[in-house]
Image (cartoon, rainbow, N blue to C red):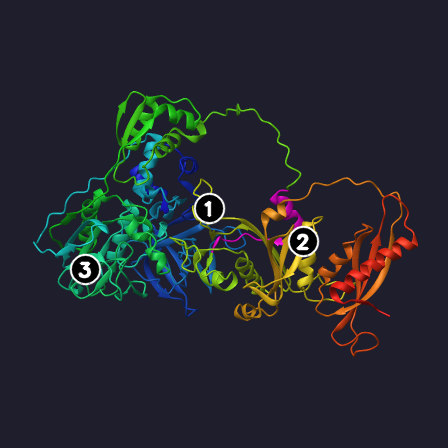
């Protein structure tokens, strides 16, 4: 919401400065995101009239102008050399006198005007364009002022340049503040300054013509007002004051009729639409759309509606998207003579989300989906009609006003004692009543309670907490006392059996990963392709059409971040995310933290792409692979020892994927991205990913103290020949299962597979070299005991896998 301060002060003018006004609004919940002056400072720039303009004798593109700066003296004339193409006799323009300072340029220095000679002709000042005054980027010619602009008067005064533009960042519950008058109403309540409410008088009809309007969907439109205005001059020029105000609201001037509609929307928050009457066939019908109906909008888009979208139609088809945007077929143009002015109350739930469905947004939709006052449609039609008659002329017809189904105000009770408790400051009933009196709402009182009937412009007053919020912000958050907490503070020692999520973040950063934060709602194709989820949880009102489902895996989000980085020429990407995922689970009950039937576990996922290390001299560059991430997982979970079991996952390469198990429970997957998705997502190389259950990562075993061995350990190396199908983990576990308890650890340190079968290694076999560590806590080991334990280990491998010692 953007507006000029001067317009606000026409409705309510408290005796405070611009900065104090901005702070007041922010502290009242209407956050002022930005305040800026309408124009940067300048001095000695006045209104001048060109009385003569002749060709420069020594330059083709320059003109020698005579300008006067006084209404009373025609002798007070200055000579100015000017190169603007629109410099002509009779126009009034800004003149920077000798000694004037214009707004700073790109170097930040003010530009001072001096008397000078241009191609041998004296020039005593400079005629200015809008760009030179920093009013706009228009440098096509001089800034032409209105013909009645007083000569010699400072341009800042004439154009009201000593004004400020406020930009508010409003939350969705503040629909009543989406207009200049609405903000002024808030300022009046906050400061006690009087609110000026202009009297909108009814325009007397000059003919009896009416357009038949039938409202079929009362759940779409609760009130519909309109009138015919004939013989309108659509080519009339929008007054400069209206153009300036619209520009300061961030709205460019289009045409007189469109500008009038936009002006009243910014003034009172009432979106409206003006139809070309001659293009309407017979009548208007307000209804829900029908499957297959198409509409070309004012923005040039052609859309297809269905029965969930409200429309305004005539006898031949759809003409407007209800509450959002008009259609191109009935748009006003320079040839329009007769118009139909419409203002209606559209139910917020009937408009919400419809424009996003078609991938665009409008000011009208933004207001209607939050709620627009249904009580003033007729008054605003009168306001629009009067502006049309004043600017474009015409003859107004009688006003049609159909009141069908309006919101019912439900009284809300405020308990004064509870309000004081929640706000945290002493409040009496009289002070609370004064708040509602200043807000202009109807209320009644009983001992200890105030019953408030929400006004038609407040859609956000529904429960007691809403009233408590109003009391707090009108009284002033800065009035809240600084009271220290009275509850005892006890230090809680965290459990050593778990670590915090931030400790995991630090651990991932130490492993050279960078954290990312992504939306929980994602594209449905990610769920289908990467998570194998054909029935994801859908978002009822997505912020964008593609982000329509809740994620059940973090992998899609990481791939999106990878593609974003690759598009910016990042060759090496290592990222991770800790976030929540969402999956259907009938066993989850409804609670304050969870929705029934939806599991919401936290996950840790990481992705590595490109080189395994930064470029360096001590190691050859190689691409990251499965074993790099396997090592990262082992380091992250240490001293607990995860087990990696070959498995499949919809997002991962079927031959390079493993299920991660910890204490016999699956906690996630690790692997290389599936070649199909690598090609689909246009990745030059394969990424390697893992995803883990965060709860398993956070838990850890308490350290157990063990005495230092009093006897030395021994180690023996053996080389076993086995079939290629024998797995490493199964072999190591078997060798470590020593009945005598002497074998404490088994490590593989070499694998040998000859190119051609040779010696005692046949085709389909390989040699594994393993080191066995042996220890007895009670006595020294003897060679006999060591050899017996090693022989027993070899025998177990022979019986289980057909292993034999390599000769």
Residue 388: x %, y % from top left: 20, 53
Secondary structure category for the residue under label 1: loop
- Residues at marks 2 and 1 touching, judged by CB atoms closer than 8 Å: no
Q: Is residue 310 above or below residue 434?
A: below
Secondary structure category for the residue under label 2: loop
Pointer 3: what residue?
Answer: 233
Residue placed farthest to the front in the image? 799
| Residues packed near mark 1 inside 10 Å, few (<14), some (14 to 19) or many (20 plus) | some
Residue 514 sits inside the magenta stretch = yes
Residue 746 sits inside the magenta stretch = no
Pointer 1: what residue?
Answer: 588
Ranked by sequence position, the earlier of labels 1 and 3 is 3
- Residues at marks 1 and 3 touching, judged by CB atoms closer than 8 Å: no
Ranked by sequence position, the earlier of labels 3 and 2 is 3
Ranked by sequence position, the earlier of labels 2 and 1 is 1
Pointer 2: what residue?
Answer: 642
Give the number of the mark in front: 3 or 2.
Answer: 2
Residues in magenta? 499-521
Q: In the rendered view, does 372 fall on the left or right side of 213?
A: right
Q: In this view, does 262 lie above or below 526?
A: above
- Number of numbered tags placed on the structure image: 3
Q: In the rendered view, does 288 fall on the left or right side of 656?
A: left
Give the number of the mark in front: 1 or 3.
Answer: 1
Residue placed farthest to the bottom in the image? 756
Q: Is residue 458 above or below residue 523?
A: above
């Amino acid at each position: 919401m953007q507006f000029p301060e001067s317009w606000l002060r026409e409705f309510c003018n408290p005796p405070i400065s611009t900065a104090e006004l901005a702070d007041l609004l922010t502290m009242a919940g209407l956050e002022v995101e930005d305040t800026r002056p309408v124009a940067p400072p300048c001095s000695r720039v006045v209104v001048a009239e060109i009385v003569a303009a002749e060709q420069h004798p020594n330059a083709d593109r320059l003109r020698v102008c005579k300008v006067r700066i006084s209404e009373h003296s025609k002798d007070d004339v200055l000579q100015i050399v000017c190169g603007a193409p629109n410099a002509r006799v009779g126009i009034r323009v800004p003149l920077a006198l000798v000694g004037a300072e214009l707004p700073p340029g790109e170097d930040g220095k003010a530009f001072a005007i001096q008397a000078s000679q241009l191609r041998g002709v004296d020039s005593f000042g400079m005629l200015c364009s809008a760009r030179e005054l920093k009013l706009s980027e228009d440098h096509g010619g001089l800034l032409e002022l209105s013909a009645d602009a007083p000569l010699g008067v400072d341009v800042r005064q004439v154009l009201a340049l000593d004004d400020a533009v406020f930009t508010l960042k409003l939350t969705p519950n503040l629909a009543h503040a989406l207009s200049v008058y609405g903000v002024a109403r808030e300022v009046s309540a906050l400061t006690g300054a009087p609110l000026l409410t202009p009297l909108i008088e009814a325009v007397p009809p000059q003919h009896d013509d009416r357009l038949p309007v039938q409202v079929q969907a009362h759940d779409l439109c609760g009130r519909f007002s309109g009138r015919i205005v004939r013989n309108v001059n659509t080519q009339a020029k929008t007054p400069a004051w209206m153009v300036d105000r619209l520009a300061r609201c961030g709205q460019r001037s289009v045409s007189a009729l469109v500008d009038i509609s936009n002006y009243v929307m910014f003034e009172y928050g009432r979106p409206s639409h003006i139809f070309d009457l001659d293009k309407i066939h017979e009548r208007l019908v307000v209804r829900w759309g029908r499957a297959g109906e198409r509409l070309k909008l004012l923005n040039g888009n052609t859309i297809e509606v269905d029965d969930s979208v409200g429309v305004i139609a005539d006898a031949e088809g759809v003409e407007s998207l209800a509450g959002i945007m008009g259609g191109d077929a009935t748009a006003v143009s320079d040839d329009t003579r007769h118009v139909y002015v419409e203002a209606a109350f559209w139910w917020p739930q009937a408009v919400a989300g419809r424009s996003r469905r078609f991938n665009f947004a409008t000011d009208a939709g933004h207001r209607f989906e939050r709620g627009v006052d249904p009580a003033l449609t007729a008054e605003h039609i009168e306001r629009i009609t009067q502006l049309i008659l004043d600017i474009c002329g015409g003859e107004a017809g009688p006003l049609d006003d159909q009141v069908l189904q309006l919101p019912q105000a439900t009284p809300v009770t405020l308990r004064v004692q509870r309000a004081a408790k929640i706000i945290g400051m002493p409040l009496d009933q009289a002070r609370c009543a004064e708040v509602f009196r200043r807000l202009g709402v109807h209320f009644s009182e009983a001992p200890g309670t105030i019953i408030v009937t929400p006004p038609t412009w407040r859609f956000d007053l529904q429960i007691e907490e809403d009233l408590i919020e109003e009391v707090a912000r009108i009284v002033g958050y800065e009035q809240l006392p600084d009271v220290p907490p009275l509850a005892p503070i006890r230090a809680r020692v965290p459990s050593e059996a778990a670590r915090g999520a931030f400790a995991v973040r630090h651990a991932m950063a130490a492993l050279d990963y960078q954290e990312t934060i992504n939306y929980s709602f994602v594209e449905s194709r990610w769920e289908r392709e990467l998570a194998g989820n054909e029935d994801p949880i859908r978002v009822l009102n997505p912020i964008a059409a593609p982000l329509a489902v809740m994620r059940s895996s973090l992998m899609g989000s990481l791939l999106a971040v990878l593609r974003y980085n690759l598009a910016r020429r990042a060759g090496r990407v290592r990222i991770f995310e800790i976030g929540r995922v969402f999956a259907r689970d009938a066993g989850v009950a409804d609670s304050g933290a969870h929705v029934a039937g939806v599991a919401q576990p936290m996950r840790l996922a990481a992705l590595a792409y490109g080189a395994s290390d930064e470029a360096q001299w001590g190691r050859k560059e190689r691409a990251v692979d499965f074993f790099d991430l396997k090592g990262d997982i082992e380091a992250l979970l240490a001293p607990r020892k995860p087990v990696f079991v070959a498995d499949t996952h919809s997002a991962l390469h079927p031959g390079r994927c493993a299920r991660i198990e910890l204490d016999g429970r699956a906690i996630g997957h690790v692997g290389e991205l599936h070649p199909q998705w690598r090609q689909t997502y246009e990745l030059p190389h394969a990424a390697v990913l893992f995803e883990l259950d965060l709860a398993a990562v956070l838990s850890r075993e308490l350290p157990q103290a063990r005495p230092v061995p009093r006897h030395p350990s021994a180690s023996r190396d053996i080389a076993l020949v086995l079939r290629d199908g024998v797995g490493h983990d199964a072999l190591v576990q078997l060798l470590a299962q020593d009945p005598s308890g002497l074998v404490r650890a088994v490590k593989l340190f070499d694998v040998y597979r000859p190119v051609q079968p040779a010696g005692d290694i046949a085709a389909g076999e390989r040699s594994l070299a393993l080191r066995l560590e042996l220890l007895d806590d009670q006595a020294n080991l003897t060679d006999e005991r060591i050899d017996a334990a090693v022989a027993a280990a070899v025998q177990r491998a022979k019986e289980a896998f057909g292993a034999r010692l390599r000769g």
